[in-house]
Image (tube, rainbow, N blue to C red):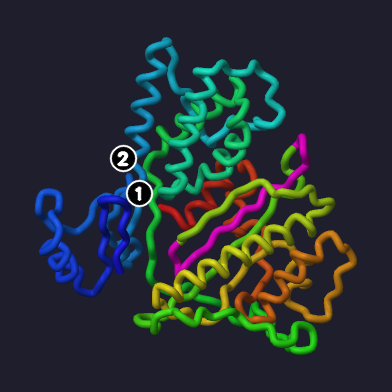
C-alpha cells in the first residue's frame, strides 16, 4: 500500500524495501536513499514500545515547537509574550461567542486566520486535546475580535507547556464486554436492511480489524445561537484515527435531539470509514461498536419497539436505527464520566480533560 502526497511517499508492506527499490529504478529519489520514515506531513512518526506493545506513534512536537517559536518571535516585535500557566487551552469561563472586545484590523484578521490554520493542522497531526477550542474559535474567522486573538495566544501558551502529546496506533483489539450489547430482530421494522458492500473492493487480506466509536454532544452549548457541539472519536482496533468536533447545523430543543444528531453524523463517518477500509482490502470484524452516554438515545437505537414522538428528530432516529438493523453498528450506553468524545464537545477543566486524554494519548 502506497501513500503519496506530492513528493512524499510512504510504503506499508511486509517487505517495503522491494517496492521502494522498484520505484527507485524508475524515479530519482531525494538523496537517492530509502529509509524507515521519521517524518510525514509535519508529524514525527516512529516505532516505539508503549506498555509492552510495539506500535507506530505520531507526534506533532517539532511542528508545535516551530509554530510557538514563530509566534513568540512575532510577539517580541511588539513587546508581548505568550501567557504563562495555561492549564487548559482556553481561559476559564471564556466563551468566544460572547466576546465583545474590539474588532481586529485587517492585518490582525489575517494573522488570526493564519494562526488558526496552524492550530487546525496541529489538530490533524494528533493534538485532539485542543480540537474543541480550535473549532469554537474557527467560527469567528470572518470577523475575529481582539479577545479571540488573545485566546489563540492562550492555546499556544498551553501547547508550550504541553508540547509532547503523542498518538499510539495500537494494533491490538480492545477487550469488549459482549454482554453490554443487545441483539434484536429488526426484520419487521427495517426489512431488507443491509450494509452496502462495494462490489469492486479488492479481496480482503491480512488481519481482521475492529472499529469503535465514542459519540457525544454538548446540548445548546453555544450561548448565542444555542446550537450544540458534536464530538466523535473513531478507533481502528485501539488506535484513534478520526476525531470530529463541530457545531451542529440546527438548534435542538433537547439533549435527546442534539445527541441523536451527533449519532447520525457518527453513522455517516463510520460508513465512510468502513467503505474506505474495504477498498483498501482490509477485512473488518463485525459491526462498529458505538458508545453513547445518553440512555434515551441508546434505547431508541437498540430496541426495535421504541417509538419516536418528535418528528423533528426522525431523520437522525431512522438513520441510526437502520444502521443498527443493517449490522453496520451496534450501540451501548457509556458512562458520561468515561465517554472519550466529551473532549470534543465542550470546554473541560484540566483534571477532566487530562483524565480522558490520557486514555488514548501519551
Kindly state the secondary structure of the residue where label 2 is placed. Answer: helix
Kindly state the secondary structure of the residue where label 1 is placed. Answer: strand
As drawn, the label of residue 17 is none
Is mark 1 in CB contact (under 8 Å) with mark 2? yes
Q: Quarter-wise, where is residue 349 in the image?
A: top right
Percent coordinates x, y for residue 327 in the rendering: 62, 81
- Magenta-colored stretch includes residue 71: no
Q: Which residues are magenta?
A: 223-239
Percent coordinates x, y for residue 182 in the rendering: 69, 82
Q: Residue at the spot x=32%, y=61% of the render?
A: 3
Q: Is residue 190 left or right of residue 142?
A: right
Percent coordinates x, y for residue 34 in the rendering: 14, 58
Q: Is residue 110 left or right of residue 74?
A: right
Is 302 rendered above or below residue 35? below
Is 87 rendered above or below residue 278? above
Out of 157 and 349, give the one closest to the viewer.
Answer: 157
Q: Is residue 66 left or right of residue 267?
A: left
The crowding category of the residue bearing disc 1, from other C-alpha atoms within 10 Å (few below 14, some 14 to 19, many at least 20), is many
Q: Provide the residue designation for mark 2.
A: 62
Is 17 rendered above or below residue 94? below
Q: Residue at the spot x=35%, y=20% of the render?
A: 73
Q: Provide the residue designation for mark 1.
A: 59
Q: Quarter-wise, where is residue 65 in the image?
A: top left
> Which residue, as the protein is rendered here, is positioned at the far front?
26
Percent coordinates x, y for residue 55 in the rendering: 32, 64
Amino acid at each position: 500500500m502506497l501513500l503519496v502526497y506530492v513528493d512524499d511517499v510512504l510504503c506499508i508492506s511486509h517487505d517495503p524495501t522491494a517496492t521502494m527499490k522498484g520505484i527507485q529504478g524508475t524515479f530519482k529519489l531525494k538523496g537517492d536513499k530509502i529509509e524507515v520514515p521519521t517524518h510525514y506531513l509535519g508529524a514525527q512518526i516512529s516505532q516505539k514500545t508503549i506498555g509492552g506493545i510495539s506500535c507506530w506513534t505520531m507526534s506533532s512536537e517539532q511542528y508545535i515547537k516551530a509554530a510557538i517559536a514563530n509566534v513568540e518571535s512575532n510577539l517580541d516585535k511588539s513587546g508581548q509574550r505568550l501567557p504563562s500557566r495555561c492549564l487548559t487551552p482556553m481561559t476559564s469561563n471564556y466563551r468566544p461567542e460572547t466576546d465583545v472586545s474590539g474588532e481586529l484590523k485587517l492585518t490582525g484578521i489575517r494573522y488570526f486566520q493564519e494562526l488558526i490554520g496552524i492550530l487546525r493542522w496541529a489538530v490533524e497531526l494528533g493534538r485532539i486535546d485542543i480540537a474543541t477550542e480550535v473549532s469554537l474559535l474557527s467560527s469567528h474567522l470572518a470577523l475575529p475580535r481582539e479577545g479571540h486573538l488573545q485566546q489563540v495566544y492562550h492555546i499556544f501558551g498551553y501547547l508550550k507547556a504541553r508540547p509532547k502529546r503523542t498518538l499510539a496506533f495500537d494494533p491490538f483489539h480492545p477487550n469488549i464486554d459482549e454482554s453490554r450489547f443487545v441483539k434484536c430482530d429488526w426484520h419487521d421494522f427495517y426489512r431488507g436492511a443491509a450494509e452496502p458492500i462495494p462490489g469492486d473492493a479488492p479481496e480482503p487480506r491480512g488481519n481482521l480489524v475492529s472499529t469503535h466509536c465514542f459519540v457525544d454532544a454538548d446540548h445548546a452549548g453555544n450561548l448565542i445561537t444555542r446550537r450544540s457541539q458534536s464530538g466523535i472519536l473513531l478507533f481502528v482496533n485501539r488506535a484513534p484515527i478520526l476525531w470530529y468536533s463541530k457545531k451542529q447545523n440546527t438548534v435542538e430543543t433537547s439533549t435527546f435531539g442534539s445527541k441523536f444528531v451527533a449519532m447520525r453524523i457518527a453513522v455517516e463517518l463510520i460508513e465512510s470509514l468502513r467503505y474506505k477500509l474495504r477498498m483498501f482490502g482490509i477485512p473488518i470484524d463485525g459491526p462498529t461498536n458505538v458508545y453513547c452516554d445518553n440512555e434515551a438515545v441508546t434505547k431508541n437505537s437498540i430496541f426495535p419497539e421504541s417509538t419516536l414522538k418528535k418528528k423533528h428528530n426522525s431523520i437522525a432516529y431512522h438513520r441510526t436505527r437502520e444502521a443498527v438493523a443493517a449490522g453496520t453498528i451496534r450501540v451501548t450506553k457509556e458512562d458520561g464520566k468515561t465517554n472519550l468524545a466529551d473532549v470534543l464537545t465542550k470546554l473541560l477543566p484540566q483534571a477532566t480533560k487530562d483524565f480522558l486524554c490520557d486514555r488514548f494519548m501519551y
